[in-house]
Image (cartoon, grey):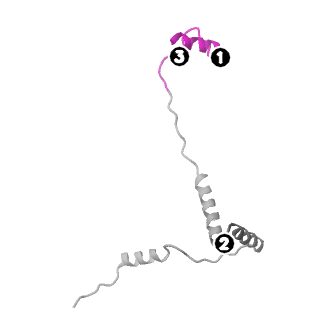
Amino acid sequence: MERRQKPGLRTFLLRYRNLYHGLVKTTLDINDQLLTEAKALAARRRTSLTRLIEEGLQLRLRAESDAAPRPRVRLPVFKGRGGLIAGVDPLSNRSLLEAADDDA
């Protein structure tokens, strides 16, 4: 005779997690005018109101994640010696071009 064990916590969590995998029905309170406009838009696009609401939520969530602050990037700075050749005016394009032509 085979003895069956009681389902443990792990089994319970796996079953519970799968309850909400996929579609979930929910109730929303939406302004009547907004609902009318949304239904009309869904009809014009030949899609369902559910799909239209899902697209709107996806767009909003994507915008929120894109707006998240990004870490500052530190640019490398050369701290070595050097600089322009004597006699080259860094504020003059002609002087810079002439100096570039001299090296070529």
Q: Which amino acid does label 2 sit on?
A: Leu
Give the number of the mark in front: 3 or 2.
2
Percent coordinates x, y for residue 4 in the rendering: 28, 86
Q: Contact (CB < 8 A) between labels 1 and 3?
A: no
Q: State the residue at coordinates (63%, 72%).
A: 50
| Disc 3/disc 2 C-alpha distance (Å) | 65 Å
**Residue at which label 2 appears:** 49
- Quadrant of residue 51 within the rendered picture: bottom right
Percent coordinates x, y for residue 20 in the rendering: 50, 75
Q: Which mark is residue 83?
A: 3
**What segment carries the magenta color?**
78-104
Question: Is residue 89 toward the left or the right of residue 31 in the image?
Answer: left
**Residue at which label 1 appears:** 91
| Disc 1/disc 3 C-alpha distance (Å) | 14 Å
Q: Which amino acid does label 1 sit on?
A: Leu
Q: Viewer-proximal residue, 90 or 50?
A: 50
Q: Contact (CB < 8 A) between labels 1 and 2?
A: no
